[in-house]
Image (tube, helix red, strand yellow):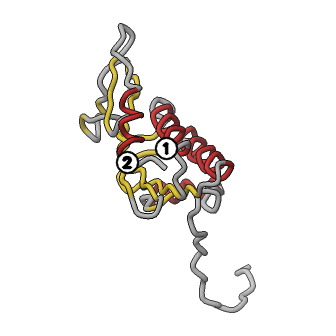
Amino acid sequence: MPSPAVVASTVAERRAAPSAAGQVTATGGAETRRDSPHTHPLLGQGPPLTVALDPGTAGALTVRLAGDLDMDTVDLLRRTLDQVLRHGFASVAVDLSQLRFCDSSGIRTLLFGCADAERLGCRMYVVNPRPFILRVFELTGVTSLLGLPERRAPERPDRGYAPPPF
């Protein structure tokens, strides 16, 4: 099994050159295309998505995401997961603690990544989602598919039955 450094360098070697159509933004050994540098009016400047690989022990790897995971940036995550999963890690944790936004295309990419990992004999799961991202996962019914524990709604105290006030 190659080391995570080999995976990172393999991903980094695939960087595309800037084209007339856009600019290449890269962090963590992968890239994404934008027609102009990303500037979010509320969050300030910064790359839309960064991916960092953090080697663990015993064949484990953590993929750390920061920024926005949306239809403009899912290719970055998809390419990274394809590279990582093909290197035979026993488990891959995707840390979302620094993720600011995730749309349906991001959820789809995470779900397909988990399915690809299972097919390749690897366990991929999501860790540390921010509360608002976890809520989106709960509303869409994908928490267990992403390896997150199901949260139970807090039970309401029994107040007895009272007829409607007519």
**Which residue: 50% across, 55% down?**
92
59 is higher (above) or lower (below) than 81: below
Q: Say what secondary structure mark 2 lies in.
A: strand
Residue 49 picture quarter: top left
Q: Position of residue 127 (x, y in %)?
A: 47, 61
Q: Position of residue 83 (x, y in %)?
A: 50, 38
**Which residue: 57% across, 79% down?**
154
> Which residue reaches farthest left?
45
Q: Position of residue 149 (x, y in %)?
A: 58, 69
Using residue 145 as the reference point, say whether residue 136 is left or right of it: left
Asked if the residues shown at circle 1 and circle 2 are in contact, with their CB atoms under 8 angstroms apart, the answer is yes
65 is higher (above) or lower (below) than 123: above
Residue for badge 1: 84
**Which residue type does callout 1 highlight?**
Val
Q: Pick whichever, 32 or 29, lies toward us.
A: 29
Q: Say what secondary structure mark 1 lies in.
A: helix
Using residue 59 as the reference point, say whether residue 40 is left or right of it: left
**Which residue: 59% across, 45% down?**
113
Residue for badge 2: 53
